[in-house]
Amino acid sequence: MKLIRRALSRLDNDNRLTIPRAVRDALGLKSGDMVSFELNESGRVILEKGESSKLGYLDAPASTLEEWLSAEDEAAYRAL
């Protein structure tokens, strides 16, 4: 993708960030759209217009770990 231009945005006190208009326009983002962030090894962030159907896999492991959330397990493994 061609670099359109650099844009800055400041993180507010609630840790929210406004995506600059030039970036929103280039990605075709509108209110309510999903946005995905990918952090690569060099510390650069790739921001893309996300689709919730493609991001569902991120929640899948959580449902398989519920069996480990009991008070008994917490007590048994606390000292590890």
Image (cartoon, rainbow, N blue to C red):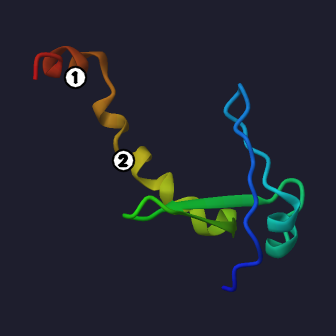
What kind of residue is marked 2? Thr
Q: Position of residue 30 (x, y in %)?
A: 89, 61
Q: Position of residue 59 (x, y in %)?
A: 50, 51
In the figure, is residue 15 to the left or right of 32? left
Q: Quadrant of the N terminus?
A: bottom right
What kind of residue is marked 1? Asp
Q: Is residue 12 depicted above or below 55 in this figure?
A: above
Q: Position of residue 60 (x, y in %)?
A: 46, 55
Pick the front one: 66 or 18: 18
Q: Quadrant of residue 74?
A: top left
Q: Residue at x 73, y 41 (%)?
A: 10
Q: Residue at x 74, y 53 (%)?
A: 8
Q: Residue at x 40, y 51 (%)?
A: 61
Pick the front one: 21 or 28: 21
Q: Alpha-carbon distance for marks 2 and 1?
A: 15 Å
Q: Quadrant of the C terminus?
A: top left
Q: Position of residue 36 (x, y in %)?
A: 63, 61
> Mark 2 = which residue?
64
- Which tag, 2 or 1, sits closer to the chain's start? 2
Q: Is residue 25 depicted above or below 30 in this figure?
A: below
Q: How many marks?
A: 2
Q: Is the residue marked by circle 1 packed among few (<14), some (14-19), or many (20+) residues within 10 Å?
A: few
Q: Quadrant of residue 19?
A: bottom right
> Mark 1 = which residue?
73
Q: Residue at x 20, y 14 (%)?
A: 75
Q: Contact (CB < 8 A) between labels 2 and 1? A: no
Q: Secondary structure at mark 1?
A: helix
Q: Is residue 62 depicted above or below 72 in this figure?
A: below
Q: Is the residue marked by circle 2 packed among few (<14), some (14-19), or many (20+) residues within 10 Å?
A: few
Residue 34, which numbered label? none
Q: Secondary structure at mark 2?
A: helix
In the figure, is residue 78 to the left or right of 41? left
